[in-house]
Image: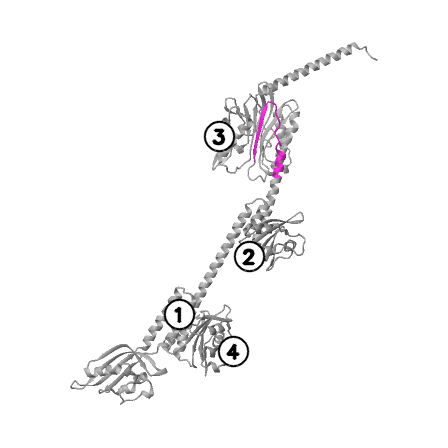
Amino acid sequence: MRRVSGRPGPQHAGTAGARIADATDADHDLRALFGESSAVFASLAGPAHMLETANAAFFATIGGPERTRTGVPLGQLVPELVEQGFIELLDRVYRTGKAHTGREARVLLGGGASAREAFFDFTYEPRTDAGGNVMGVRLIGVETTQVKHAQRLTAEHRVLLEQIARQAPLPEVLDGMARAIEELAPEEVLVSVLLADADGRHLRHGAAPSLPAFYNQAIDGIATGEGVGSCGTAAYRRQPVIVTDITADPFWDDFRDLAEKAGVAACWSTPILARDGSLLGTFAMYHRTPRTPQEADLALARVFADTAALGIERHQAEQARTAAEAREKAARDDLAFLLNASTSLSTSLDAAEALKRLAEACAPALSPLCAVDIVEGGRVVRVAAAAPTETQRDLLAAHIPVYEAADDAVARVLASGTSEVARRTPTGPGPWHDLGVTGYLCVPLVDRDTAFATLTLLSTGDHSFDGHTVALAEELARRAAAAAHNARQFTQRAALARDLQAGLLLPGLPDVPGADVATYYHPAGEGLEVGGDFYDVFPLDDGRWAFLLGDVCGRGAVAATTTALVRHTARAVAPLLPGPVDVVQAVNRALINRPGSHGTGFVTLVYGQLTPTSTGLDIELVRAGHTLPLRLDSRHAVHPVDAPGLLLGVVADPQLTPHHLCLRPHESLVLYTDGITEARRADELFGDQRLRDAVADAPGHPAAQHVIDTVTRAVHAFTGGHDIDDDQAILVLTATATATATATASATATASATATFAATATATARTQDAEPPRG
């Protein structure tokens, strides 16, 4: 027995000299594998084919020193040639005098276990004397055994390389390589390939088609280290380790019984190294009997170890690419999941609905069961639950955690603001058994560093939570918290806007004698800001009525203060001033004198006063930079009402001009803001003409509301129902058929009151005349 440590495996070459050395080693391996072709010559005499002379290559070929003799018949010197028909060929050449040529003839030299297969290209030529008589045969041959071996090895090697190139599964490549070597080896050999773990500390089964299964299982996972068999030691040393007799080698102390049971007695192991020198595995050749390797054996091991390295590196590269693609796909899937869930959460402007969508997004994507709880009024309220079946959902929804319970996961997460995960049922009471819960993940929803809700995911069966799921749930909870916060803010702002708007608009229209009054108001956007359009109708002390409609530059709280300033100023001064011009000038002064913090925007306004008369409604109005009012007469003709005047809040004197008109019964005055005429369809405006056409399309003897309905339908049809860019407001005053009766009754009441007052004054004077003076 002897143990041989061979030369190191291939190392990463960083210089030209190293590359030349590698190439030289490769040439050496090929020469060791294939040897060198030799030419043999022998001269035979007589019909017995007596060996007269031969070269050294002939004697080396037929069997070495014991056969190095002359003067002996060839059939007696090399008896195995008789059974293979070569002596018979010599006889024929000797008898006929005709040469015989053979190509790649297979010859078995020697006998028993030492028999050697060889191949030759040969020629048998007759030897003749001067008279042409055959005296003997001349044998000339070239051994082609090495060529045949090279061809077989090259073919097998090409097959392996093709498998590697087409990315055949690594087990298939290694198994094919092992079988090829076992077939190519001149003696029985059992091949094994072990693959190194990523850390290089253990070896795993790769391929060993001829070793017993129990042996492969036993060595699967062995450590790399000094003295750990042939393979563990070779992997540790990064050098070949040759054990010629397992029964006597200390490297095999822990595996000797296993080797004996498997029927192996020698093991030569070569490390498989990557181009950077890292360990990929080991290539081992086992033998049934103790055996020392020849140079050709070591060369064969090195060649196929390099081939195995190529296949393993290609396999690892493919695995790395597949893993990278899988990670990329997982990242894309996670991003798509978060984007879809975020879109679903953010499109809801109701906080409760957003949390319900959170539960639906998590189940079953992240867990079979999901619940969302929120803190309201010092207690926990379950606002959403999701489950595979309605029964499970109802059961989960009915369970309410206790806010201050120390044994409740939801309470703990609300208190700590940190996630909690466990592979068991949640502590505290709950329908865990009925739902088959095996684990849970509870994640807080945090707003301004305070947990206001929790997302609870529940596992059933074999489902469990890994770090990836926890990270996704926490990210989704963060986005859900932001969505719920935004929804609450929207709800609060919308409520505030509605409250402010309600305070700036009439809660209900008053009954104006002789007039039918209708209004329309539609704010732009989602209603989060108070609009800039406003209107008002209110009575004056002498039977007259004031009306106004205007537009404040801007939106929001500042616009609200300006709107309130205009309406309240008009209501305060109108009973004290003689006419519309004075009232509007007072409003303009109020706007100019307002504090800067209350806004500096301008205002457009139409303000007027109406008086019921025997012929309809007598109206005096002032227009301050506003859109032109429209008069719809009884013939359904529409007339713009022009009353020159400048914007309010800009200059001290807006140069107002009053305009008087009388509305007869069934005639209407239409006031509107520019949100109507500037309604858009792409780049086209609704415009003044479409508005006039819409007003003219109102039904015969229209009520005020009919006029508004006709206009709004026309605007809606024009825009296609799309959101509007500006607030819209309309005020319509229509003289009614009762206007004349109302005016007559008012005149009669006034005359009666005057007569009563005169009669009373006369009676009082007469009484005073009848009484004597006092004093």
Q: Name the residue under label 4.
A: 254
The quadrant of the picture occupied by the N terminus is: bottom left
**Does residue 599 appear in the picture of this structure?**
no
* Magenta stretch, residue numbers: 496-522
Mark 2 and mark 1: span between their CA atoms?
42 Å
Q: Where 270 falls versus 547 (above or below)?
A: below
Q: Are marks 2 and 1 in contact (CB under 8 Å)?
A: no
Question: Which badge, 1 or 3, is on the more N-terminal residue?
Answer: 1
Q: What element carries label 3?
A: helix
Q: Where does residue 62 sit, x and y in percent of width and height?
A: 31, 84
What residue does disc 2 label? 469
Can residue 309 be spotted in the picture? yes
- The first of marks 2 and 1 along the sequence is 1
Mark 2–mark 3 CB contact (< 8 Å):
no
Residue 704 screen position, x and y as percent: 55, 27
Is 476 contained in the magenta span?
no
Position above or below: 285 against 649: below
Question: Which amino acid, mark 3?
Answer: Arg
Q: Spatial distance from mark 2 to mark 3, Cα to Cα?
A: 59 Å
Q: Which of 84 and 226 is in front in this view?
A: 84
Residue at 58% from the left image edge and 44% from the top image edge: 350
Nearest to viewer (mark 1 / mark 3)? 1
- Give the quarter of the image for residue 743: top right
Between the residue at mark 4 and the residue at mark 1, the CA separation in whole angstroms equals 30 Å
Question: Which secondary structure lies at badge 2?
Answer: helix
Position in image of residue 486 (x %, y %): 59, 46
Q: Mark 1 points at which residue?
A: 176
Amino acid at pointer 4: Asp
